């Protein structure tokens, strides 16, 4: 019949209309903006995860590229 998400959405619609006094056009706008915000947050999380992976790759590459340097001392010529 109705999913939990559908029931929750109806609860939100009821609250927006009864408690906040929004008309249905206002409710539609609020719901659309909430959906867009949710999608934007998901995209930000994906991009942050991708960025963390890229930073880790760079750090691993730095470790591979590091070479220990020791200055050789030539014998004293006196």
Image (spheres, rainbow, N blue to C red):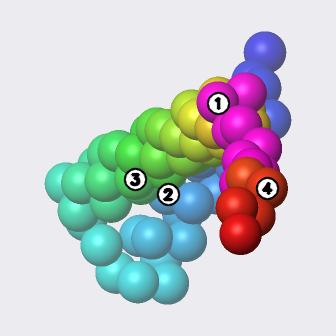
Towards the viewer: 43 or 29: 43
Which secondary structure type mostly characterizes the magenta part of the structure?
A: loop
Q: Are marks 2 and 4 in contact (CB under 8 Å)?
A: no
Q: Nearer the viewer, residue 47 or 31?
A: 47
Q: What's the mark number on residue 13? A: 2
* Point 47% across, 77% down: residue: 18
Left or right: residue 34 compared with residue 51: left
Q: Closer to the camera: disc 1 or disc 3?
A: 1
As rendered, which of 29 and 61 lies closer to the eye? 61
- Residue 27 visible? The answer is no
Q: Does the stretch in magenta take in 58? A: no
Q: Which residues are magenta?
A: 64-73
Q: CA distance from mark 4 to mark 1?
A: 30 Å
Q: Looking at the rendering, in which quadrant would you find the C terminus?
A: bottom right
Q: Between marks 1 and 3, how big is the CA–CA gap?
A: 42 Å
At which x and y percent is residue 73? 75, 56
What percent of the width, then of the height, locates residue 72? Answer: 74, 50
Give the residue at mark 4: 75
Viewer-proximal residue among 57 and 74: 74
Q: Residue at x 80, y 35 (%)?
A: 4
């Amino acid at each position: 019949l109705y999913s939990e998400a559908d029931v929750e959405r109806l609860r939100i619609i009821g609250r927006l209309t009864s408690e906040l006094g929004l008309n249905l056009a206002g409710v539609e706008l609020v719901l659309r903006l909430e959906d867009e915000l949710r999608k934007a947050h998901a995209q930000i999380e994906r991009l942050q995860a991708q960025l963390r992976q890229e930073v880790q790759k760079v750090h691993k590459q730095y470790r591979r590229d590091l070479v220990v340097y020791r200055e050789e001392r030539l014998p004293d010529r006196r």
